[in-house]
Each structure stands twice: as structure tokens, then as C-alpha cells.
Image (cartoon, rainbow, N blue to C red):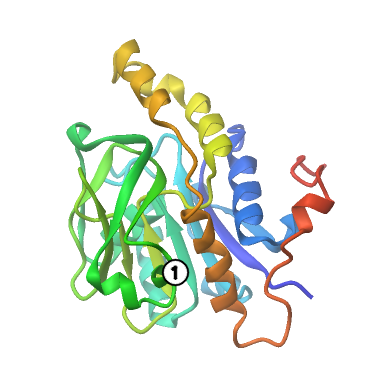
């Protein structure tokens, strides 16, 4: 038996990153691909009945939608559903665009700020509160992470715990107190190779924002981020704790090298 996790995605059907993101989460969580059940947010948020049919919720990134521009279809309804999931206390991990959605949903504010854009691999620092967190406490005080954003949290929601920051951005991760719910501005589901693929996939979005020299500087900044790759396996352990089943299969992806191919 494998626990099913619902992956909320804000990506168009023709976007290859839609499948790649699902694969990345499966790899980092160390579960079979079919354990990650994708859901298209462009059609509106999932029903609470559908959410409850899964043991955890994941919220992914976005290629072309911006929380501050309010251009995600059904964004108000999605924010309301995220608030309801938080009220349920269902385990949740939100990454990048998902972090921004969570901040906005819970009463914070997201702004578009090109001056604090982080695209590449950057050092991230734990807050004091993070050092005793059951998830972030496994990380060193400073670690490298994969980032790709031009929006940031200007104001955090009341009551949340800020877990990390960077040299440019004050809020890089948060937790809902007392609940197994975390969100990160960075991408713990991506390793170096995944991130390079993602960056090149969306290069057309960056082309009009940055010079060729700036884009090359971004590419030059990419490097491994082994510490953040520990976060999602630990999250899976937290999800599985109430159930008497193996929480993940460390060698699954080594045994099934073609599992990343799209299913017909």
C-alpha cells in the first residue's frame, strides 16, 4: 500500500513541466509516480471531498502565473480552499508559487519585485525558530537551495512561523504552528539537473526581463543543493507516522529508471 498525495498544479496542459514537476516530487519523496495524484488548478480548486481522499497535499510552482497579478484562473476560490485545507490540518507542503499562494491565502501579501529576483542556487539561512522544527531541524544553519522567483512575500500572515531567509529575501519558508503544514519559496523537489531543465524550459519568460549577461550569470550560479533534498523524505516520514506502512522506497527510482516517462 502506498499513500496518495494530491499535487495541485498551476500549469497548462501543454507545458512539459507539468509532468516533470510530478516526477520531481515523486523522486524527492521517494515514492512511485502513481502515489502523486496531479490536479489542475486552472479548472478551479479541488473539492474538499477530493482533498480528504488523500493523505497529504502538495502545491507546486508555476510557469506563467503570478499571485500578485491575480492572473491564476479561479484564484480567489483557490485561496479559499487553501484556507480550508489549513483548517483541516491535513499535511501539506507548498513550493515556490505554492508558498506565495499560501502567504496570500492566510493574510500576508505577495509583491512583484524584480530587484529581489532569485534564479539559480543560493545560500539560505535558518531562523532560530527553525532549529527546533520537526522538519527544518534536520538542516544545517546555512544550506544551498534551488530558487526561481520574481515575486516575494512582503508581509507574512499573522501567526505563522518564519523558518528561513536569504541575503535578498526575508521570508523563504514558513510553518503553520501546531500543524504539519510547511511552505518554501525555494524548490526542495528540484536537484541541480531538474532545475537546469526547468530554467531552460522557461527561458522565454526571462528573456525580456534580463540581458544575456544576466541570464548567463544565473546559469553560472547553479550548483548542487544536497541539504534541501532531505526535506521531502523527512516530510514523507511525518505524513506516514500515523500509518503502519513503509513511508517511502529509497531505491524505487533506481530500480525503475523509465518510471519518469509520461503514461499513456
The residue at 21%/47% (across/down) is 169
> With respect to residue 63, does 230 lie above or below?
below
> With respect to residue 61, does 202 lie above or below?
above
User: Residue 184, position in %: x, y?
Assistant: 37, 57
Would you name the residue on which mark 1 appears?
138
- Residue 166 lies left or right of residue 189; in this view the side is left
- Residue 106 lies left or right of residue 199; in this view the side is left
Most foreground residue, 134 or 104: 134
SS at circle 1:
helix
The residue at 53%/61% (across/down) is 230
User: Residue 178, position in %: x, y?
Assistant: 35, 84
Mark 1 neighbour density, 10 Å: few (under 14) some (14–19) many (20 or more): some
- Residue 187 lies left or right of residue 24; in this view the side is left
Question: Is residue 46 visible in the rendered structure shown here?
Answer: no
The residue at 42%/24% (across/down) is 219
Q: Quadrant of residue 215?
A: top left
> With respect to residue 262, does 253 lie above or below?
below
Most foreground residue, 249 or 11: 249
In which quadrant is the N terminus drawn? bottom right
User: Residue 203, position in %: x, y?
Assistant: 45, 22
Question: Is residue 207 visible in the rendered structure shown here?
Answer: yes
Q: Quadrant of residue 218?
A: top left
Q: Quadrant of residue 257?
A: top right
In which quadrant is the C terminus drawn? top right
User: Residue 90, position in %: x, y?
Assistant: 49, 78
Residue lying furthest top in this view?
212
> With respect to residue 176, does 214 lie above or below?
above
The residue at 67%/69% (across/down) is 4
Amino acid at each position: 500500500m502506498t499513500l496518495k498525495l494530491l499535487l495541485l498544479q498551476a500549469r497548462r496542459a501543454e507545458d512539459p513541466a507539468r509532468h516533470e514537476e510530478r516526477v520531481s516530487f515523486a523522486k524527492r519523496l521517494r515514492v512511485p509516480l502513481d502515489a502523486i495524484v496531479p490536479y489542475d488548478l486552472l479548472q478551479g480548486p479541488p473539492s474538499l471531498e477530493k482533498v480528504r481522499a488523500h493523505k497529504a497535499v502538495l502545491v507546486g510552482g508555476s510557469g506563467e502565473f503570478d499571485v500578485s497579478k491575480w492572473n491564476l484562473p479561479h484564484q480567489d476560490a483557490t485561496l479559499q480552499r487553501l484556507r480550508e485545507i489549513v483548517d483541516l490540518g491535513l499535511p501539506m507542503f507548498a513550493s515556490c508559487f505554492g508558498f506565495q499562494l499560501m502567504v496570500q491565502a492566510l493574510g500576508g501579501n505577495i509583491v512583484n519585485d524584480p530587484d529581489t529576483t532569485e534564479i539559480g542556487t543560493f545560500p539560505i539561512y535558518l531562523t532560530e525558530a527553525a532549529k527546533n522544527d520537526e522538519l527544518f531541524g534536520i538542516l544545517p544553519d546555512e544550506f544551498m537551495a534551488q530558487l526561481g522567483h520574481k515575486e516575494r512575500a512582503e508581509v507574512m500572515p499573522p501567526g505563522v512561523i518564519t523558518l528561513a531567509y536569504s541575503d535578498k529575501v526575508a521570508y523563504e519558508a514558513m510553518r503553520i504552528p501546531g500543524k504539519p503544514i510547511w511552505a518554501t519559496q525555494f524548490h526542495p523537489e528540484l536537484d541541480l539537473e531538474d532545475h537546469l531543465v526547468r530554467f531552460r524550459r522557461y527561458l522565454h519568460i526571462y528573456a525580456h526581463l534580463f540581458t544575456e549577461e544576466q541570464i548567463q550569470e544565473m546559469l553560472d550560479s547553479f550548483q548542487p543543493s544536497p541539504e534541501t533534498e532531505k526535506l521531502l523524505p523527512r516530510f514523507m516520514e511525518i505524513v506516514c507516522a500515523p500509518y503502519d506502512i513503509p513511508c517511502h522506497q529509497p531505491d524505487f527510482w533506481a530500480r525503475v529508471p523509465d518510471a519518469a516517462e509520461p503514461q499513456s
